[in-house]
Image (tube, rainbow, N blue to C red):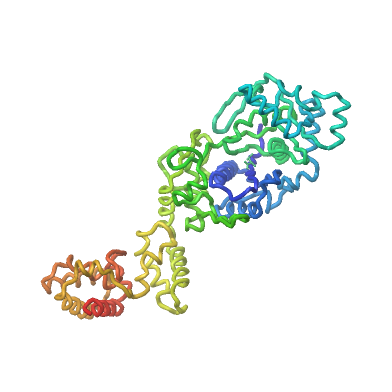
Amino acid sequence: MNRRVRLRFAPSPTGPLHIGGVRTALYSYLFAKKHGGDFLLRIEDTDQTRFVPGAEEYIIESLNWCGIKIDEGVGVGGPFAPYRQSERKESGIYAKYAKQLVDKGYAYYAFDTSEELETARKNAESRGTSFSYNAQTRNSLKNSLSLPESEVKQCLAQQNYVIRLKVNPDEEIVLNDLIRNEVKFNSNIVDDKVLLKSDGMPTYHLAHIVDDYLMQISHAVRGEEWLPSAPAHILIYRYLGWENEMPQYGHLPLLLKPDGNGKLSKRDGDRLGFPVFPLEWKDPNSGEISSGYREKGYEAQAFVNMLALLGWNPGTEREIFSMEELCHEFSFSHVHKAGAKFNPEKAIWFNTQYVQKSSDDYLVGKLKEQLMSVLNLSEQDKRLSVDYLTPAVHLIKPRIHFAKELYSTAPYLFESPENYDLKIIEKRWKPELEGFFNQLTKDFDQINNFESAVVEEQFKQSAVAAGIKPGDVLQLLRLMLSGVGSGVDLFGMIALLGKKEVQERIEKALKKITN
Ligand code: GLU
């Protein structure tokens, strides 16, 4: 069948989007784009009790941040609008198809109260089995198949019923999964799932099928927690007569905790200090804040790259891919069947790669923002000029993992230190060195071309002339200029600060140390 490739991401707005959900969206998007198709966003909000305000906006903002473009859906519109299930319900589509199944004998009305179902469950448990509403049990329960017609009419008149799928025993069900290939089931393991709830809302089982069908979805990719329900879904397609239009399902393996023991949860993130959400989230009820990759300073592209490789590989050792390259390379045949262990260090590694290959323009812009928020500088200040910031970025860049660390990694490039690491003074300083440093500032006067290599050469000569090993005073020189014992390339820093600033800093430090 030659159909247009259309994939949807169909989250429920029950809270912030877990990175596992972002990965589902990403893989769907990559596959759609690889095949020149569409990526849709549908909001599955039929469970009103789990609705969380702000969650839908959060989902959209997360996709935007990742660069996952929505072709059709909530917030964008499109030919199959509305794309929010609560709004779609208004037109009665879900009830219509549920009734159609009842009329064809593939579904029935059930009137059991939750207490009655609970009793049935307990009874089954006391017999050492688990309760299932199915071909074996349905005749002893309260529904339109077991009750006399007059009673059914009465019950229906009270408008208090659910519609359940009537699963025929012993049907063979074959799932042709994008990731797991062929998986066979027997309908005997499928229960008579509720399709339409008593409040008239469809369950996920019915709603996603009606919508996938009407929206002409070609591939439905979702978390593997849905795999056990897949046979029921195939039966619904079959009973509705839509099996030929059924999207190909793909069930993605879980994202696991770093040690591989179980599903990656919010608590792991809090415990181990890494976010499990793309963006920061403030719980509207408790006010509790959960950290996000964006706010932690991750580059969106690095985050996407990291996520893409959590469970997929290109078949080579290559790890760095732009979104465009991912769209080109991605395929479900290289998605692993086993769960993918989340690795926080690897996330930082990816970000580091992206920061290291960021353009000067981008990093200069970031550094400038940071400087302006920390120091009170006038627009004309030379330290804000591109000529000053570009070499500063070159000096700092090799030492950072995140762009937001630019300023804090080397604040001394922008302000003379007020404090000096006492441990280094204790270890290295000798009173007789005062003369050497005084002479050094004078020797610097002779240099016209105050460049890194020239200054370094002069420093060595001055040391030798004073009978000192350059290595014995190198760290002190750094300390005088920066206040600390290690940092960016020393002579690069000296060249950037310039002769006058360097001389002033040495003089200032000498005063402090010799006092
Ligand atoms: N609303 C479902 C969920 O959030 C969607 C599953 C699917 O993609 O079909 O798990």
In the displayed image of the protein, which residue is found farthest to the top?
170
Left or right of residue 391: residue 290: right
Picture residue at 41% right of the left edge, 56% below the top: 357
Residue 487 is at least partly visible in this image: yes
Total marks placed: 0
Quadrant that contains the N terminus? top right
Left or right of residue 206: residue 437: left
Height in image: 310 above or below 403? above
Residue 38 is at least partly visible in this image: no
In the displayed image of the protein, which residue is found farthest to the right?
150
**What percent of the width, then of the height, locates residue 21?**
57, 45
Height in image: 402 above or below 435? above
In the displayed image of the protein, which residue is found farthest to the left?
467
Could you say which quadrant of the image residue 186 lies in? top right
Quadrant that contains the C terminus? bottom left
Left or right of residue 480: residue 120: right
Height in image: 281 above or below 440? above
Left or right of residue 185: residue 452: left
**What percent of the width, then of the height, locates residue 89?**
77, 44
**What percent of the width, then of the height, locates residue 392?**
37, 68
**What percent of the width, then of the height, locates residue 245?**
70, 33
Front-lying residue, 198 or 240: 198
Front-lying residue, 58 or 364: 58
Could you say which quadrant of the image residue 415 lies in? bottom left
Height in image: 409 above or below 271? below
Picture quadrant of ligand 1: top right
Could you say which quadrant of the image residue 493 lies in? bottom left
